[in-house]
Amino acid sequence: MEIQTNGTFLDISLIKIFKHYDIQVGVSLDGPPDFHEKLRGKSGLTIRGLKLLSDYDVPFRVTCVVTEQNVGVMDQLALLLGSFSNARGIGLDILVQKGCALKKDCVSPPSSDDLKKGLKKLVQTLGWINKNRLHPIRLRELETLKRAAEKNSPSQFCHAIKGEATAIHLDGTIYPCAQTVGDPYFSCGTVESPDESSLYLLKQYSLQDTQCNDCPVSGFCPGDCPSRLYYNDAQTRCLVCVMNQTLWEEYEGSLKKRNNI
């Protein structure tokens, strides 16, 4: 069982429940406190939540929405997590161009060059941090690539692709995933009258490009979030390719250095 939270309402009673039932905890954190404050607000309460998790030795992972505004400080986020012995991982979600992301002067997707630079700094920083930790802080996207490479086969990006996930709005409308909630196109009926066939709408959105055959992760690429592919424009859709390629290049580079030693 898992729970995703921004951490602002965490208290001792909730954390004791997490610990007792071994509930996996994910916290949304978009950078060091000053950047998180600009992007989401209430950074002090989120950090307080992390400290409470640490006090009760509850492992947690962080999910960071990657934007032009924070792509250059992802390494600083890693350094922040390095101060928590119970931090276990970081997940990176490329910004979805929906809602607030469509407003001017709000947030925007990173450029390919900035994303590549930011990822390299992040991987290098995590490598340095993990040398001195009992429990490493793992990068979710890199671990996914490594598992897929070992099997020499990609896995489905998410359960929604197979129609095995649902999200329910407060008004009772069903959607194939949380990202699509509120979008009439993805409505799957209601709790009282569900439309099961519509749960498969996301299946048609897959990561395909003419350059896939020349990609270093071809054959075991995990693809991308189907709803992100639906909402994002062509330029932004390529960012997951930049991410996968950069992470794999950094990983192979680290293996070569290790073997030479």
Image: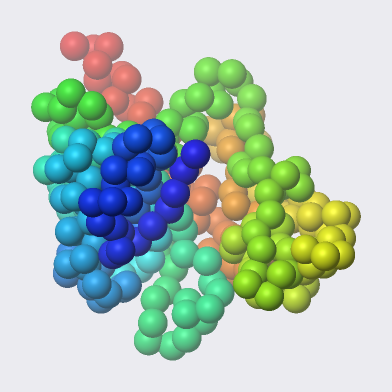
The colour scheme used to paint the residues is: rainbow
Q: Which residue is painted at 88% across and 55% down in the image?
A: 197
Residue 135, above or below 234: above
Identified at 23% across, 12% down, the residue is: 260
Q: Work out whether residue 57 or residue 141 is closer to the camera in this orientation and state it.
A: 57
Residue 35 pos. (x, y %): 22, 68
Whether residue 138 is visible to the viewer of this picture, yes or no, is yes
Q: Position of residue 242 (x, y in %)?
A: 47, 49
Q: In the figure, is residue 7 to the left or right of 124?
A: right
Q: Please tell me which residue is depicted at 24% across the width and 16% down the height of the picture.
A: 258
Q: Nearer the viewer, residue 96 or 193?
A: 193
What residue do we see at 79% from left, 67% from top?
A: 190
Q: Is residue 110 left or right of residue 150?
A: left
Residue that extends furthest to the front in the rendered view of this protein: 13
Res. 90 image quadrant: top left
Q: Is residue 123 in view from this perspective?
A: no
**Quadrant in the picture for the C terminus:** top left
Quarter occupied by residue 148:
top right
User: Is residue 250 found left or right of 192 in the rendered image?
Assistant: left
Residue 168: x and y in percent read: 66, 63
Instruction: Judge from the rendering whether residue 229 lies leftward or rightward of residue 235; answer left or right.
Output: right
Question: Residue 249's spot in the image, x, y percent?
Answer: 39, 34
Number of numbered callouts drawn: 0
